[in-house]
Image (tube, rainbow, N blue to C red):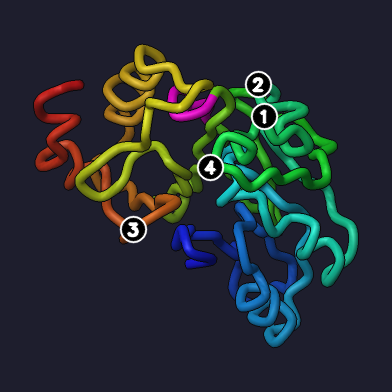
Amino acid sequence: MLGEYQTNCFVVSNPGCSEAWIVDCGFDPDEMLDWIEQRGLEPSAMLLTHTHPDHIAGVDRALGRLGPMPIYVHEAEAGFCSDPMLNLSAVLGMPISVTEPDRLLHDGDTLHLAGEPWRVVHAPGHSPGGVLFIHDASGQAIVGDTLFAGSIGRIDFPSSDPEAFRRTILDVMMSLPDDLALHPGHGPATTIGRERATNPFVVNGF
Protein backbone atom coordinates (compact mmCIF):
# COMPACT_ATOMS: atom_id res chain seq x y z
CA MET A 1 0.00 0.00 0.00
CA LEU A 2 1.48 3.31 -1.05
CA GLY A 3 0.97 6.85 0.23
CA GLU A 4 -1.68 8.45 2.38
CA TYR A 5 -4.42 7.00 0.17
CA GLN A 6 -3.16 3.48 0.98
CA THR A 7 -3.23 2.53 -2.68
CA ASN A 8 -2.57 -1.08 -3.56
CA CYS A 9 0.06 -1.06 -6.29
CA PHE A 10 1.31 -4.38 -7.61
CA VAL A 11 4.47 -6.03 -8.86
CA VAL A 12 3.57 -9.02 -11.02
CA SER A 13 6.11 -11.70 -11.90
CA ASN A 14 6.37 -15.43 -12.53
CA PRO A 15 8.44 -17.68 -10.24
CA GLY A 16 12.00 -18.05 -11.46
CA CYS A 17 11.70 -15.20 -13.94
CA SER A 18 13.17 -11.71 -13.54
CA GLU A 19 10.67 -10.06 -15.87
CA ALA A 20 7.95 -8.15 -14.02
CA TRP A 21 5.16 -5.65 -14.44
CA ILE A 22 4.33 -2.71 -12.26
CA VAL A 23 0.57 -2.24 -12.06
CA ASP A 24 -0.23 1.30 -10.87
CA CYS A 25 2.36 3.50 -9.17
CA GLY A 26 0.94 5.84 -6.54
CA PHE A 27 2.31 8.34 -4.08
CA ASP A 28 5.57 7.53 -2.24
CA PRO A 29 6.54 4.49 -4.36
CA ASP A 30 10.09 4.04 -3.01
CA GLU A 31 9.19 1.06 -0.79
CA MET A 32 7.88 -0.78 -3.85
CA LEU A 33 10.86 0.27 -5.98
CA ASP A 34 13.27 -0.90 -3.25
CA TRP A 35 11.47 -4.27 -3.22
CA ILE A 36 11.86 -4.60 -6.98
CA GLU A 37 15.57 -3.74 -6.93
CA GLN A 38 16.35 -5.97 -3.94
CA ARG A 39 14.94 -8.99 -5.78
CA GLY A 40 16.67 -8.26 -9.05
CA LEU A 41 13.41 -7.91 -10.95
CA GLU A 42 13.39 -6.17 -14.30
CA PRO A 43 10.09 -4.43 -15.05
CA SER A 44 9.23 -4.70 -18.72
CA ALA A 45 6.10 -2.53 -18.54
CA MET A 46 3.96 -0.35 -16.31
CA LEU A 47 0.22 -0.98 -16.54
CA LEU A 48 -2.33 1.51 -15.25
CA THR A 49 -5.79 0.41 -14.12
CA HIS A 50 -6.83 4.07 -14.44
CA THR A 51 -5.26 7.51 -14.10
CA HIS A 52 -6.49 8.97 -10.82
CA PRO A 53 -3.62 10.63 -8.92
CA ASP A 54 -3.24 7.97 -6.24
CA HIS A 55 -2.55 5.45 -9.02
CA ILE A 56 -0.13 7.51 -11.15
CA ALA A 57 1.70 9.96 -8.85
CA GLY A 58 4.83 7.80 -8.66
CA VAL A 59 5.15 7.06 -12.38
CA ASP A 60 8.05 9.42 -13.04
CA ARG A 61 9.79 8.39 -9.82
CA ALA A 62 9.70 4.79 -11.01
CA LEU A 63 11.00 5.69 -14.45
CA GLY A 64 13.80 7.70 -12.89
CA ARG A 65 14.96 4.80 -10.73
CA LEU A 66 14.28 1.81 -12.96
CA GLY A 67 14.75 3.32 -16.39
CA PRO A 68 12.37 3.73 -19.31
CA MET A 69 9.67 1.16 -19.92
CA PRO A 70 6.45 1.13 -21.94
CA ILE A 71 3.41 2.44 -20.06
CA TYR A 72 -0.06 1.13 -20.87
CA VAL A 73 -3.42 2.80 -20.31
CA HIS A 74 -6.88 2.33 -21.81
CA GLU A 75 -7.51 4.47 -24.88
CA ALA A 76 -10.34 6.33 -23.10
CA GLU A 77 -7.78 7.93 -20.78
CA ALA A 78 -5.18 8.90 -23.37
CA GLY A 79 -3.85 12.32 -22.34
CA PHE A 80 -5.05 12.07 -18.73
CA CYS A 81 -1.67 11.43 -17.07
CA SER A 82 -0.27 14.80 -18.08
CA ASP A 83 -3.46 16.80 -17.57
CA PRO A 84 -4.30 17.63 -13.92
CA MET A 85 -7.88 18.47 -14.82
CA LEU A 86 -8.50 15.15 -16.56
CA ASN A 87 -6.75 13.01 -13.94
CA LEU A 88 -8.62 14.97 -11.24
CA SER A 89 -5.52 15.94 -9.26
CA ALA A 90 -6.33 19.63 -9.83
CA VAL A 91 -9.79 19.06 -8.33
CA LEU A 92 -8.08 17.67 -5.22
CA GLY A 93 -5.80 20.70 -5.00
CA MET A 94 -2.60 18.81 -5.86
CA PRO A 95 -1.96 19.18 -9.61
CA ILE A 96 -0.03 16.18 -10.93
CA SER A 97 1.38 15.72 -14.40
CA VAL A 98 3.40 12.60 -15.21
CA THR A 99 4.75 10.91 -18.32
CA GLU A 100 2.06 9.92 -20.77
CA PRO A 101 1.61 6.23 -21.59
CA ASP A 102 2.82 5.26 -25.03
CA ARG A 103 0.68 2.15 -25.42
CA LEU A 104 -3.13 2.30 -25.57
CA LEU A 105 -5.22 -0.63 -24.40
CA HIS A 106 -8.53 -1.82 -25.81
CA ASP A 107 -11.18 -4.13 -24.44
CA GLY A 108 -10.26 -7.72 -25.28
CA ASP A 109 -6.53 -7.14 -25.66
CA THR A 110 -4.16 -9.85 -24.45
CA LEU A 111 -0.84 -8.96 -22.84
CA HIS A 112 1.92 -11.48 -22.13
CA LEU A 113 4.23 -11.59 -19.13
CA ALA A 114 6.97 -14.22 -19.51
CA GLY A 115 4.70 -15.98 -22.00
CA GLU A 116 1.65 -15.96 -19.70
CA PRO A 117 -1.49 -14.32 -21.15
CA TRP A 118 -3.43 -11.65 -19.25
CA ARG A 119 -6.77 -10.44 -20.54
CA VAL A 120 -7.66 -6.74 -20.63
CA VAL A 121 -11.31 -5.99 -19.83
CA HIS A 122 -12.66 -2.45 -20.09
CA ALA A 123 -14.46 -1.54 -16.85
CA PRO A 124 -15.66 2.08 -17.14
CA GLY A 125 -17.69 4.04 -14.63
CA HIS A 126 -15.38 5.02 -11.80
CA SER A 127 -13.26 6.53 -14.56
CA PRO A 128 -13.66 6.39 -18.35
CA GLY A 129 -10.78 4.02 -18.99
CA GLY A 130 -10.81 1.72 -15.99
CA VAL A 131 -9.58 -1.78 -16.81
CA LEU A 132 -9.31 -5.21 -15.25
CA PHE A 133 -6.19 -7.30 -15.81
CA ILE A 134 -7.20 -10.98 -15.59
CA HIS A 135 -4.90 -14.02 -15.45
CA ASP A 136 -7.23 -16.92 -16.06
CA ALA A 137 -4.63 -19.63 -15.45
CA SER A 138 -4.12 -18.65 -11.81
CA GLY A 139 -7.63 -17.33 -11.25
CA GLN A 140 -6.55 -13.81 -10.33
CA ALA A 141 -7.47 -10.30 -11.43
CA ILE A 142 -6.14 -6.85 -10.65
CA VAL A 143 -9.22 -4.65 -10.68
CA GLY A 144 -8.24 -1.09 -9.69
CA ASP A 145 -11.05 0.92 -8.12
CA THR A 146 -13.97 -1.05 -9.51
CA LEU A 147 -15.03 -3.65 -6.96
CA PHE A 148 -13.76 -3.66 -3.37
CA ALA A 149 -14.36 -6.06 -0.52
CA GLY A 150 -17.85 -5.01 0.52
CA SER A 151 -17.97 -1.86 -1.59
CA ILE A 152 -17.44 -0.31 -5.03
CA GLY A 153 -15.46 2.59 -6.46
CA ARG A 154 -16.75 6.13 -6.22
CA ILE A 155 -18.99 7.42 -8.98
CA ASP A 156 -19.30 11.06 -7.93
CA PHE A 157 -16.23 12.35 -9.79
CA PRO A 158 -16.67 14.69 -12.80
CA SER A 159 -15.58 11.94 -15.19
CA SER A 160 -17.54 9.13 -13.52
CA ASP A 161 -20.47 7.48 -15.26
CA PRO A 162 -22.89 5.77 -12.83
CA GLU A 163 -24.85 3.93 -15.52
CA ALA A 164 -21.68 2.59 -17.13
CA PHE A 165 -20.49 1.53 -13.70
CA ARG A 166 -23.69 -0.41 -13.03
CA ARG A 167 -23.04 -2.36 -16.23
CA THR A 168 -19.41 -2.91 -15.24
CA ILE A 169 -20.27 -4.24 -11.79
CA LEU A 170 -23.51 -6.11 -12.43
CA ASP A 171 -22.96 -7.39 -15.97
CA VAL A 172 -19.21 -7.56 -16.61
CA MET A 173 -17.81 -8.43 -13.19
CA MET A 174 -20.68 -10.64 -12.09
CA SER A 175 -20.19 -12.72 -15.23
CA LEU A 176 -16.75 -13.76 -13.95
CA PRO A 177 -16.19 -17.05 -12.05
CA ASP A 178 -16.96 -17.15 -8.32
CA ASP A 179 -13.46 -18.37 -7.46
CA LEU A 180 -11.69 -15.52 -9.27
CA ALA A 181 -9.48 -13.73 -6.73
CA LEU A 182 -9.76 -9.95 -6.93
CA HIS A 183 -6.90 -7.61 -6.01
CA PRO A 184 -8.44 -4.13 -5.71
CA GLY A 185 -6.83 -0.71 -5.63
CA HIS A 186 -7.66 -0.27 -1.94
CA GLY A 187 -8.37 -2.67 0.90
CA PRO A 188 -8.06 -6.45 1.13
CA ALA A 189 -8.33 -9.05 -1.59
CA THR A 190 -11.65 -10.76 -2.15
CA THR A 191 -13.38 -13.04 -4.65
CA ILE A 192 -16.20 -12.66 -7.11
CA GLY A 193 -18.22 -15.26 -5.19
CA ARG A 194 -17.85 -13.44 -1.89
CA GLU A 195 -18.90 -10.14 -3.41
CA ARG A 196 -21.77 -11.73 -5.31
CA ALA A 197 -23.13 -13.07 -2.02
CA THR A 198 -22.37 -10.24 0.42
CA ASN A 199 -21.55 -6.95 -1.31
CA PRO A 200 -24.58 -4.67 -0.72
CA PHE A 201 -24.08 -2.88 -4.03
CA VAL A 202 -24.28 -6.21 -5.85
CA VAL A 203 -27.02 -7.79 -3.74
CA ASN A 204 -29.26 -4.70 -3.60
CA GLY A 205 -28.14 -2.79 -6.70
CA PHE A 206 -27.26 0.89 -6.86
Tell me the crowding category of disc 3: few under 14, some 14 to 19, or many 20 or more residues within 10 angstroms, Cα based: some
Return the residue found at the far front: 93
Whether 116 is drawn above or below 95: the answer is below
Q: Nearer the viewer, mark 4 or mark 1?
A: 1
Instruction: Name the amino acid type tagged 4.
Output: Phe
Tell me where the magenta segment starts and ends, as one range. 121-127
Tell me the crowding category of disc 1: few under 14, some 14 to 19, or many 20 or more residues within 10 angstroms, Cα based: some
Determine which residue is flagged by label 3. 187
Determine which residue is flagged by label 1. 85
Measure how far apart labels 1 and 3 are at the Cα level: 26 Å
Determine which residue is flagged by label 2. 76
> Element type at marker 4?
strand
Residue 7 lies left or right of residue 166; in this view the side is: right
Q: Residue at x 73, y 40 (%)?
A: 72
- Label located before the other in sequence (3 or 2): 2
Q: Residue at x 67, y 47 (%)?
A: 47
Instruction: Name the amino acid type tagged 3.
Output: Gly
Tell me the crowding category of disc 4: few under 14, some 14 to 19, or many 20 or more residues within 10 angstroms, Cα based: many
Camera-nearest residue between 15 and 89: 89
